[in-house]
Each structure stands twice: as structure tokens, then as C-alpha cells.
Amino acid sequence: MTITKEQVVVVGAGVAGCTAALEAARRGLTVTLIDEHPQNTTAMSLDAPYFYGARLAPVLSDEGTIADRVLGSNDLLMDCLEAGVEVLTNTCVWGLFVPGANNEHMECSQVGLADAEKSWMLGFDYLIVASGARDLVLSFDGWHLPGVLGAKGATTLLGKYQALGGNQVLILGSGNLALQLASQAIEAGVNVVGIVEAADEVQGDSVLAGSLKAQGVEVFTGYCIQKTMGVNEVSGAILVPVSDKSLEPVQITCDTVCMAYGVVPNIELMASAGGAVDFDAARGGWAPLLSVDFETSLRNVFVAGDASGVTEAALISPEVSIYQGQRIAAAIAVRERPGGERD
């Protein structure tokens, strides 16, 4: 079977992926950009309750409307299209395969792709993995109820899909992930009924936290969630003090609870092909070992954005992802020059 081969394949159409694809195209490279969005409700429900939750807004079943929202909300993706990047949406990357002892027959490195109709293999000279990060979730009484979801899932529903499905949001955690989510929710017209933090002070950016407090968002420091209330979906939550017994439990009315404790890099695609990883708490846990050009231990396989490691600074500023995407594209362009480093 003949495998189609592309020069540069980018996985993920977030800031890092789009920046890398756009920069590579501007440098004369042929680029294919792949992104799993817009997802249909069947795919979303497979992630419940960790990411999108078990409650999905009816509008998510309207494929035309959702496609317009997802594509229209990503200006960088539109720039990529205008620059000649081939864009595959609603397409997941389910595997990465590089020539080695167990697959010597492979003529080139390949990724496995699938959309709503088929599954196929795509070869590449260079791969840029910008698969982002996933929510760190912790269980509590009632966490299975529709209306409980992760912060990344909430961010995606608020931004890409414009269909959160709730109007009163309680956010667990006060790092930059939580604060950024709160700001996004308020901008979308959603009422943030509180931010819950187990520590005695807010953990994220003080300026952003101050802005939220000025907008009337109450922060419950020294508290954690005991349970959510509700039968068929979330109708409220009970907070209890962590250590200060002089504090009283707090009951809050809400229809959505977002777990924003933190996120961890999505490294599975790269790691499944044998890419080296190491545990680095400063980068969100298990993260890939990378060169100065963000190349993994797998030749010509690069990682950008949150998949390379998550920091508090990167959660509120796109500059880190932009730099990584541009640097990777520049490194690849150098290898493609006559006499460059390319094998």
C-alpha cells in the first residue's frame, strides 16, 4: 500500500500548532494541520465526566452551527488557510509510528488518522505535536453529576463551541487556569458564583485575581468542596473548611462545577512511539525531554505548547506557545536548506 507523505504535519490547532503551521508555510514548507474539533456529541460524551461533562447543550448537535462557531473563533486557523496550509478538522490522530526494530518495513514515519468516515495513515518528514494539555481531576461526592466538568473542557465549550450549558459556575482551584476560566466565563455572560481554594491565599496571578474580585467574584480561601447537590444534575455545592474549624460550611447555589486544579501535558502520542519523557513538577508532571529547538528524542518529531510542559505563566500568556511554534518552524526550515541538517 502506498502511503501519502507530507513534508510537515502539525497536530493541534491551538496557538502553538497554528503558529508553527503558519510560520512553516511562510518559510516555504508544505504543511498539513490536523485538529479534532469540531467534535460531534458522540465523541464528546466519550470524555464524560472528565472533560466536557455528562451534560451537553442541544446546540452541539447542530453540526453546521458548531462548525461555523469553531472555525470562526480561531483567527489563527483562518490565517493558516489563507497561507496555503492544508487543514483537516474533525480528525483525530490515534497513533504515531516511526521506523525501528519492530517496524523495519515502514518506508517513513507515519501518523494514524481517523475522521467520521474512515481511518488512514499519513507519512511525514517532520511532525509537530501541539496536542495541548488535559484536565487534572479529583473525585468528590457527586462529581459524576451532569454539570461537573474540567476547566479545559469548560474553556473549549465557552470559546470554541459557545455552548457551556450552564449559567452559574463554581470554580475549584485558584491558579491561573482557574482565574483565566473565570475571566472567560464572565466575558461570555456566565455568572461565576465563587472560586474555591484549599490554601489560605489565591495561587494565581494577583492582578488577574484582583480584577475578578473587583467584578464581584467571591473567593473562598481555606475551603474545599465536600459534595455537589442535585439529583439529575448539579443544583449546588457544599464547601467545608480545610483546617480552620472556626469557619462554617458554605452552601452555594450553582448549576456547573468546574475542576480547575491544574492540567497535565498530553504526551501519549509522542510517548507511544518511544519518545523520552521525565517527571518534572515545574512542567505539570510527565513531560517530554526536548532539545533547545523543542525536538524530542525521536528524530524530526517536535513538541510545542502545553504538550511540551505546562507552566503558570503559559496558562495566561500565549507568548510561550508562539515562541515555541516559531522556533520549531525555523529549525525545520534550516534543515530543509541545501546543506542543512536533514537526514
Image: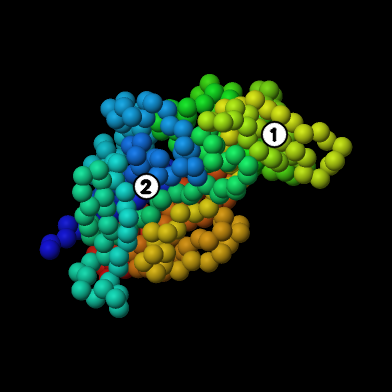
Element under label 1?
A: strand
> Viewer-proximal residue, 245 or 203?
245
Near mark 1 (Cα within 10 A), the count class, few <14, some 14-19 or many ≥20, is: some
Near mark 2 (Cα within 10 A), the count class, few <14, some 14-19 or many ≥20, is: many
Question: Marks 2 and 1, Cα distance to the nearest angstrom?
Answer: 37 Å
The relative height of residue 26 versus residue 112 in the rendered view (above or below) is above
Q: Quadrant of the N terminus?
A: bottom left
Can you see residue 203? yes
- First in sequence: mark 2 or mark 1? 2
> Viewer-proximal residue, 88 or 328?
88
Kind of residue sitting beneath label 2: Gly
Residue 182, image x, y percentages:
59, 31
Q: Residue at x 26, y 65 (%)?
A: 109
Q: Is residue 299 left or right of residue 218?
A: left
Q: Quadrant of the C terminus?
A: bottom left
The residue where tag 2 is placed is 12
User: Which mark, by number, is residue 203?
Assistant: none
